[in-house]
Amino acid sequence: MANTAQAKKRARQAENNRVRNAGQRSKLRTFTKRVLSAVEEGDVEKAKAAYVAACPIIDSAVNKGLIHKNNASRNKSRLNTKIRAMA
C-alpha cells in the first residue's frame, strides 16, 4: 500500500482512470459488435448505419488514448471490408 501522500493520490487517480477507461472500452466494443452482428444477419442497411455510428466512437477512443490510431484505422477498415463484401 502507498505510504506517501503523493503515492496515495496516484493510487486514487489510477483507480478513477481504470473505471473511466473500462466504460469507454466497453462502449467501443459494444458499437463494434453492433456492426458485426448486422453483418452476420446479412442486413446491409443496418450494418452501414451501425458502421456510421461506430466510426466516431472509435475515433474518440483514439483521442482519449484508449487505443492507438493505427488500431482504430485497422478496425474501421476491417469492418468496412465486411460490409462491402455483403453487397
Image (cartoon, rainbow, N blue to C red):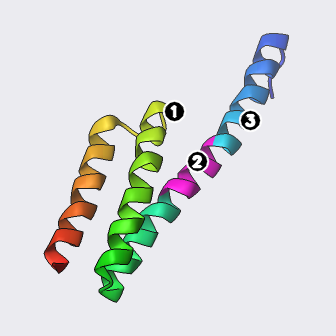
Q: Secondary structure at mark 3?
A: helix
Tag 1–tag 2 contact (CB < 8 Å): yes
* Nearest to N terminus: mark 3 or mark 2: 3
In percent of the image, x 36 and y 36: which residue is there?
68
Residue 12 in the image: state x and y as whole percent.
79, 28
- Which span is picked out in magenta? 21-28
Marker disc for residue 24: 2
Task: Give the foreground label among 3 and 1.
Answer: 1
Going from N to C along the chain, the mark reached first, 1 or 2, is 2
- Secondary structure found at label 1: loop
Secondary structure mostly taken by the magenta-highlighted segment of the chain: helix
Q: Amino acid at mark 1?
A: Lys
Q: How many discs appear?
A: 3
Q: Amino acid at mark 2?
A: Gln
Tell me the residue that label 3 is attached to: 16
Badge 3 density bin: few <14, some 14–19, many ≥20, Cα 10 Å: few
Identified by mark 3, the residue type is Asn
> Which quadrant of the rendered structure holds the C terminus?
bottom left
Look at mark 1 in the image and give the residue it sits on: 64
Q: Residue at x 32, y 36 (%)?
A: 69
Tell me the distance, in whole angstroms, between the alpha carbons under discs 3 and 2.
13 Å
The residue positioned 67% from the left and 34% from the top of the image is 17
Q: How far apart in space, not on screen, are marks 1 and 2 (Cα)?
A: 9 Å
